[in-house]
Image (cartoon, rainbow, N blue to C red):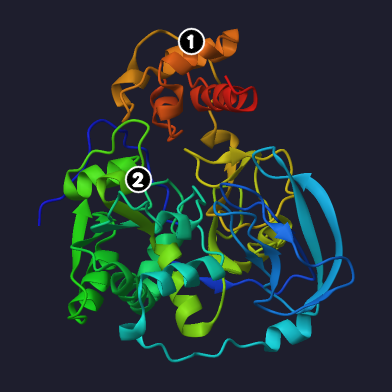
């Protein structure tokens, strides 16, 4: 079967060897959780629990505030200690609900499987279930999933594209899910198919994961009522970006400024599917996630399943602690992730990785040599060097005129830059300035 891909992009070393064969392990139940009310794109959720309130696993603690918002649930038994405002990894402020955990009771809790009549599901039931579970895009964007599956009357979704690419270096949590929870993935696809009757269901997996391709192919072959096509993809970054994946999987192009649903496509990450299956078959909302902890600066790199709100310091302890000359700590992957000034943050729905990079893995910046490599690799055909230069100079309208908002911050430009200029950081700065000042 030929592998497919998109134009341009880069080929970074994947650094996945430390965790690709590491099965997912559960973290010990934390004594304290700090759960932000804003873990998704859109309006922050509204707390429905206050100081002193008791909570149980799966109980709603924050309700969605409007259509583009997502519910938040308690992962544990415990009591709300306080609600305090603290920064998120990207710097934006958010209210956090702190829960003192009843560790013993939480450890004893088990989710009970429930029967689901797939034939009785319609579109409304599927979308309502996704919203009730607080499911968001787990590939990094954290867009509320029920919004993705609620196209306007003028748009009709005919194709589901499943993102099993995981092209970010170091990260292997999605890879492990495709191996360890293959059955649940297929069941979630069947649920979505009942609601939307897709004409095509394309499951994209990079060709450097042959074990995942085999596992998903075998599981899909055993399901006769849902036509799942496995699409091997070339190993290239950012193959897993929504627009790149759609083009590689079925040749459709998402126009600038448009959304995939406007060309009849919706994309779902593998962890998003697992979360959908958890809700429909187990009544379990999105209260935990798998995160890859890796880098040369961590003693034991692992894939960990942690409750939402788990302090990052607990993950470090679960991996044996920090070793060597750690220069940078990144939430997410090295290409699109955010550098952290401290470990005083916690796991959110969008937490895919926590990386500890040593001095040998981080290169200092030098002056631009005008080589144009950033332009050569940009999958959106932008001019990153000019966007960054305008941001540095405070010329935000000029940056906007060069299609600033079409950049999805994949980091290909910064990776290809021989001067190691922080191009994405400057572009993010410009986008935030334009947004805040409504330019």
Which quadrant of the figure has residue 229?
bottom left
Mark toward the start of the polypeptide (1 vs 2): 2
Q: Secondary structure at mark 1?
A: helix
Residue at (76%, 66%) from the top-left corner? Answer: 48
Left or right of residue 276, residue 391 in this image: right
Residue 436 picture location, percent across and down: 64, 27
Residue at (37%, 51%) from the top-left corner? Answer: 152
Task: Name the residue nearer the viewer: 13 or 154.
Answer: 154
Task: Name the residue nearer the viewer: 219 or 281.
Answer: 281
Above/below status of 165 relative to 24? above
Where's the C terminus, which quadrant?
Answer: top right
Label at residue 242:
2
Which quadrant of the figure has residue 53?
bottom right
Residue on which disc 1 sits: 398
Above/below status of 250 relative to 173? above
Residue at mark 1 to residue at mark 2: CA–CA distance: 27 Å
Left or right of residue 202, residue 43 in this image: right
């Amino acid at each position: 079967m030929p592998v497919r891909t998109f134009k341009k992009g880069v080929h970074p070393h994947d650094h996945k060897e430390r965790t690709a064969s590491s099965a997912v392990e559960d973290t010990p139940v934390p004594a304290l959780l700090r759960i932000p009310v804003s873990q998704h794109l859109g309006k922050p959720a509204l707390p429905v629990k206050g100081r002193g309130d008791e909570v149980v696993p799966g109980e709603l603690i924050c309700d969605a505030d409007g259509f583009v918002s997502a519910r938040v649930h308690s992962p544990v038994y415990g009591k709300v200690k306080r609600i305090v405002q603290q920064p998120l990894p990207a710097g934006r402020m958010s209210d956090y609900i702190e829960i003192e955990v009843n560790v013993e009771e939480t450890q004893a809790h088990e989710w009970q499987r429930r029967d689901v009549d797939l034939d009785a599901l319609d579109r409304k039931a599927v979308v309502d279930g996704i919203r009730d579970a607080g499911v968001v895009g787990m590939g990094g964007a954290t867009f509320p999933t029920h919004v993705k599956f609620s196209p306007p009357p003028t748009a009709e979704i005919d194709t589901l594209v499943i993102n099993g690419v995981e092209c970010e270096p170091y990260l292997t949590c999605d890879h492990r899910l495709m191996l360890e929870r293959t059955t649940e993935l297929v069941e979630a696809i069947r649920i979505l198919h009942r609601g939307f009757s897709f004409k095509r269901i394309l499951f994209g997996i990079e060709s450097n994961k042959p074990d995942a391709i085999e596992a998903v192919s075998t599981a899909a072959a055993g399901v006769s009522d849902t036509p799942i096509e496995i699409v091997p993809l070339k190993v290239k970054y950012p193959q897993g970006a929504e627009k790149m994946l759609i083009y590689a999987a079925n040749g459709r192009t998402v126009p600038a400024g448009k959304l995939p649903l406007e060309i009849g496509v919706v994309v779902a990450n593998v962890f998003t599917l697992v979360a959908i299956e958890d809700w429909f078959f187990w009544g379990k909302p999105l209260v935990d996630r798998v995160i890859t902890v890796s880098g040369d600066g961590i003693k034991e790199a692992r894939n960990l399943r942690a409750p939402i709100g788990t302090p990052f310091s607990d993950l470090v302890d679960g991996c044996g602690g920090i070793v060597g000359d750690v220069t940078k700590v990144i939430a997410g992957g090295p290409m699109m992730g955010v550098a952290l000034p401290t470990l005083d943050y916690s796991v959110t729905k969008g937490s895919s990785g926590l990386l500890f990079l040593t001095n040998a893995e981080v290169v200092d910046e030098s002056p631009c040599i005008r080589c144009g490599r950033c332009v050569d690799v940009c999958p959106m055909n932008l001019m990153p060097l000019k966007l960054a230069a305008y941001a540095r100079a405070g010329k935000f309208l000029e940056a906007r005129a060069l299609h600033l908002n079409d950049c999805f911050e994949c980091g290909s430009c910064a990776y290809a830059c021989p001067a190691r200029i922080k191009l994405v950081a400057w572009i993010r700065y410009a986008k935030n300035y334009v947004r805040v000042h409504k330019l």
